[in-house]
Image (cartoon, helix red, strand yellow):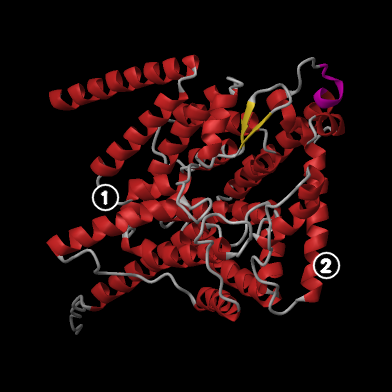
Amino acid sequence: MLPRALKGVAILVLGGLVAILLGKMIGEGDYESLLLLCYLSLGIFLLTTPGYVPLLALGVLNPLVLPIPFIYNFPFLIVMFGVCVVKLVFRDTLTHTEFRNYQSCLTLWISVFFGWVAMRYLMKPVMPNLTGFGASITGFRSYLGYAICFVLIIGLPLFIKTREDMLKLFKWMAGLSIFFILLFIPLTITKSLTAAMWLQRLGVFVTFFDNGWLRFVVLPGFGLTLIVLTLLPTLLPVSRGWRRVLFCVGMAAIFMGGNRSTAIMAVVSVLIVSLMRLQFGRFLAVLAGLAVLVGIGTYIGENIRVKSGFGFMRILALTSKRVAQQTEAGSTWEWRQNLWRLAVLEIEKNPLLGKGYGGVENAWLFSTYDEYQRSESDLGLATGGAHNGFLASTYALGIPALLLFLIAFGQISYRSGRQILTFRNKDPVLADMQLFIFTNLVTLLMHVYIGIDLNSPSIWFFVTLAALLIRMKESETRTNQLAASRLPLPTQTATA
């Protein structure tokens, strides 16, 4: 008992010292030391963490990217995946057990979809700019994204083999979400251009609110993850009071991120959890509360008087035209609509096989800013950056690719939702794990509509988790049926 108490005290003291050190660095603007400390912490984490699950959780949630030559915005998830593969090989060499009981998560429709992507690539193979980043867009990065997603689907079952691994993954996701929320919220109010520049170099998209505060687009995503997990007590076994506190922390992250789409996703997530758990009272209460908040937000947005800008109250642009105009939040939607119209026109020209990624020569050669603005749409479409994954994939791969994706995604989502309803009372832990995954699948579909392309690793990460959990339950059922069939039949006594 005493060693455990000493361990807790040591962790508390070290945590306090680290918090003081971080506060001092942020206060003094010493971001170079802060960056070195982050690298040191990451290195210690990689060397000391047991198993694979913490590395996978970090890979999914870490907003930073590695500045790998020739490939822009290389996903951190695949870096952690590579570390896990190295650990796996060494462990199997010692134990000869790591590659056993492999459960493939490839379905027929997923295989056909990635086969179509491979066929489209082979029709016009492209390579990265080996001489540097270059002036042309080859499209290699987008195709590489699909290859990374396919490797993820194949390899993830090697590291997550049991329910305990899945539960551990979700707990780590909650802890890392809290960490990044507590890291980015203090940086938001610093108004530090230096901090923004350093984080931009590490791949974090940073912009500014109209009052000069830093706006981290990734911040609301951590809040969304935390909110969903607090609604599922079997996945986050803490007291009700702590769950309420963490729910408020997640809401604060969404609010201070100023991201309207994530706010909508949060509402949808709460509604999905309430509906799938058959909590109709909470479902109606959320709808009623939402109506009240819309009314309050509209009144505040139209009547509030600000001097230095709305700041993170930019989120009120959801309900107030005045806030949308003054914070220029409305213009982003108009820009998306114009980009989508251009994508539709190109799709009509190449409906079956698409236009492919890349194909833009001298993409970064501009003499004026007006020339850049005129070429910005072409750059977005060529790289899959149409801010609508359905249009981006159809533009590049053709209408059949989109249909194949929808069938594959819909099949996994349907089976995930069916497991939630089937095992809600029989196996509540399994149902809650699938509910967390199902909720993320729905919100990711919304994210595809307004942002990410279909080659985003986060999409296929949760698709694979859903398929893996389905496979686990099927395997458990077969094992139980086999064990039952081997039991001796009860003897029957003859009656006179």
Point out residue 19 in the picture as x, y percentages from the top left corner.
39, 20
Q: Report the amino acid beneath label 2.
A: Leu
For label 2, count other residues whose C-alpha is less than 10 Å away and answer few (under 14), some (14-19) or many (20+): few
Task: Locate the N terminus and report the quarter of the image it occupies.
Answer: top left
Q: Residues within 10 Å of mark 1 (few under 14, many from 20)?
A: few
Q: Which residue is mark 1?
A: 51
Label 2, on which residue?
345
Distance Cα–Cα, label 1 vs label 2: 49 Å
The part of the chain drawn in magenta is: 300-305
Q: Write down the quadrant of residue 441 in the picture.
A: bottom right
Please tell me whether residue 206 is drawn above or below residue 311 in the rendered image.
below
Q: Nearer the viewer, residue 222 or 2?
A: 222
Of the numbered discs 1 and 2, the one sitting upstream in the chain is: 1
Give the image location of residue 31, x and y in percent: 46, 25
Q: Is residue 301 magenta?
A: yes
Answer whether residue 11 is visible to the viewer in this image.
yes
Residue 348's place in the image compared with 334, above or below, is below
* Amino acid type for the residue under numbered disc 1: Gly
Q: Is residue 180 left or right of residue 475?
A: right
Which is more toward the observer, 159 or 293? 159
Measuring from the top left, give residue 459's x and y in whole percent.
54, 58
Please tell me which residue is depicted at 63% across the width and 61% down the height of the picture.
137
* Label 1 SS: loop
Q: Main secondary structure of the magenta part?
A: helix
Q: Where's residue 374, x and y in %?
A: 81, 52
For label 2, the SS is helix
Q: Quadrant of the C terminus?
A: bottom left
Residue placed at 42% from the left, 57% from the top?
A: 426
Number of marks present in the image shown:
2
Query: Where is residue 360, by image quadrant?
Result: bottom right
